Image: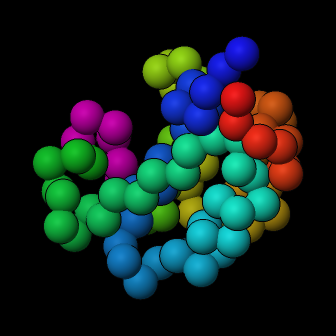
Amino acid sequence: MGNCMDKVVVNFSASWCIAPVYSKLSEAFPSFTFLSIDVDRMTEMSTPWDIQATPTFIFLKDGQQLDKLVGANQVELEKKLEQFGFLPLTKCS
Protein backbone atom coordinates (compact mmCIF):
# COMPACT_ATOMS: atom_id res chain seq x y z
CA MET A 1 0.00 0.00 0.00
CA GLY A 2 1.20 3.51 -0.79
CA ASN A 3 0.91 6.64 1.22
CA CYS A 4 -0.01 10.24 0.46
CA MET A 5 3.59 11.28 -0.09
CA ASP A 6 4.17 8.95 -3.06
CA LYS A 7 1.90 11.11 -5.28
CA VAL A 8 2.56 14.84 -5.14
CA VAL A 9 1.59 17.95 -7.10
CA VAL A 10 3.72 21.03 -6.46
CA ASN A 11 2.25 24.40 -7.39
CA PHE A 12 4.88 27.09 -7.99
CA SER A 13 2.97 30.36 -8.01
CA ALA A 14 2.38 33.66 -6.30
CA SER A 15 -0.03 33.82 -3.37
CA TRP A 16 -2.68 35.54 -5.49
CA CYS A 17 -2.56 33.01 -8.33
CA ILE A 18 -5.02 30.06 -8.72
CA ALA A 19 -5.19 29.36 -4.96
CA PRO A 20 -8.98 28.77 -4.77
CA VAL A 21 -8.94 26.26 -7.66
CA TYR A 22 -5.89 24.46 -6.27
CA SER A 23 -7.51 24.23 -2.84
CA LYS A 24 -10.68 22.68 -4.27
CA LEU A 25 -8.68 20.17 -6.29
CA SER A 26 -6.77 19.12 -3.18
CA GLU A 27 -10.12 18.27 -1.58
CA ALA A 28 -11.37 16.42 -4.67
CA PHE A 29 -8.15 14.39 -5.05
CA PRO A 30 -7.22 13.36 -1.48
CA SER A 31 -5.12 10.38 -2.60
CA PHE A 32 -2.01 12.53 -2.85
CA THR A 33 -0.32 15.58 -1.42
CA PHE A 34 -0.69 19.09 -2.84
CA LEU A 35 2.13 21.51 -2.05
CA SER A 36 2.31 25.23 -2.80
CA ILE A 37 5.49 27.23 -3.13
CA ASP A 38 5.19 31.02 -3.25
CA VAL A 39 7.89 32.01 -5.73
CA ASP A 40 7.85 35.59 -4.43
CA ARG A 41 8.85 34.40 -0.95
CA MET A 42 10.98 31.38 -1.83
CA THR A 43 12.83 32.44 -4.98
CA GLU A 44 15.60 29.88 -4.38
CA MET A 45 13.11 27.05 -5.04
CA SER A 46 12.37 28.13 -8.62
CA THR A 47 15.79 27.56 -10.19
CA PRO A 48 16.23 23.83 -9.53
CA TRP A 49 12.78 23.15 -11.00
CA ASP A 50 13.28 25.48 -14.01
CA ILE A 51 10.25 27.63 -13.19
CA GLN A 52 9.89 30.26 -15.92
CA ALA A 53 6.26 31.33 -15.36
CA THR A 54 3.53 31.03 -12.76
CA PRO A 55 1.66 29.03 -12.03
CA THR A 56 3.71 25.96 -12.86
CA PHE A 57 2.59 22.56 -11.61
CA ILE A 58 5.09 19.74 -11.16
CA PHE A 59 3.67 16.20 -10.94
CA LEU A 60 5.74 13.75 -8.90
CA LYS A 61 5.35 10.07 -8.10
CA ASP A 62 7.74 8.27 -5.78
CA GLY A 63 10.02 11.32 -5.93
CA GLN A 64 10.30 11.29 -9.73
CA GLN A 65 8.96 14.07 -11.94
CA LEU A 66 6.25 12.78 -14.27
CA ASP A 67 5.28 16.01 -15.98
CA LYS A 68 5.03 19.77 -15.80
CA LEU A 69 2.10 22.04 -16.62
CA VAL A 70 2.60 25.78 -17.09
CA GLY A 71 -0.39 28.09 -16.84
CA ALA A 72 -3.66 28.41 -14.95
CA ASN A 73 -5.67 25.98 -17.06
CA GLN A 74 -8.00 24.13 -14.69
CA VAL A 75 -9.22 21.69 -17.36
CA GLU A 76 -5.66 20.67 -18.26
CA LEU A 77 -4.71 20.41 -14.60
CA GLU A 78 -7.61 18.02 -13.95
CA LYS A 79 -6.68 15.99 -17.05
CA LYS A 80 -3.12 15.61 -15.77
CA LEU A 81 -4.36 14.48 -12.36
CA GLU A 82 -6.51 11.80 -13.99
CA GLN A 83 -3.82 10.87 -16.54
CA PHE A 84 -1.34 9.95 -13.85
CA GLY A 85 -3.84 7.89 -11.92
CA PHE A 86 -4.59 10.49 -9.30
CA LEU A 87 -8.24 9.58 -9.22
CA PRO A 88 -10.56 11.77 -7.18
CA LEU A 89 -12.16 10.85 -3.88
CA THR A 90 -9.92 8.01 -2.79
CA LYS A 91 -8.35 7.78 0.63
CA CYS A 92 -4.67 7.46 1.48
CA SER A 93 -3.61 4.13 2.88
Q: Where is residue 24 in the image (x, y as percent from the top left)?
A: 69, 71
Q: Residue furthest front?
A: 93
Q: Residue, x 84% and y 50% (percent of image)?
A: 88
Q: In this view, does 40 lie above or below 93?
A: below
User: Where is the N terminus found, in terms of image quarters?
Assistant: top right
Rendered-image quadrant of the C terminus: top right
Residue in the image at 33% along x and 40% along y: 50
Residue 59 in view (yes/no) = no
Q: As rendered, which of 50 and 16 lies closer to the eye? A: 16
Q: Is 63 positioned to the left or the right of 89 in the image?
A: left
Q: What stretch is highlighted in magenta?
A: 47-52
How many numbered dots are placed on residues in this image?
0
Question: Left or right: 72 with respect to 64?
Answer: right
Instruction: State the residue at coordinates (36%, 77%).
Output: 15
Using the rendered view, name the quadrant where residue 90 is placed. Answer: top right
Q: In which quarter of the image is residue 22?
A: bottom right
Is 45 included in the stretch rendered in magenta? Answer: no
**In this picture, is 31 found above or below 79?**
above
Asked if residue 49 lies in the magenta stretch, the reply is: yes
25 and 50: which is toward the camera = 25
| Horizontal and vertical percent position of residue 60 | 55, 30
| Residue at 52% across, 76% down | 19
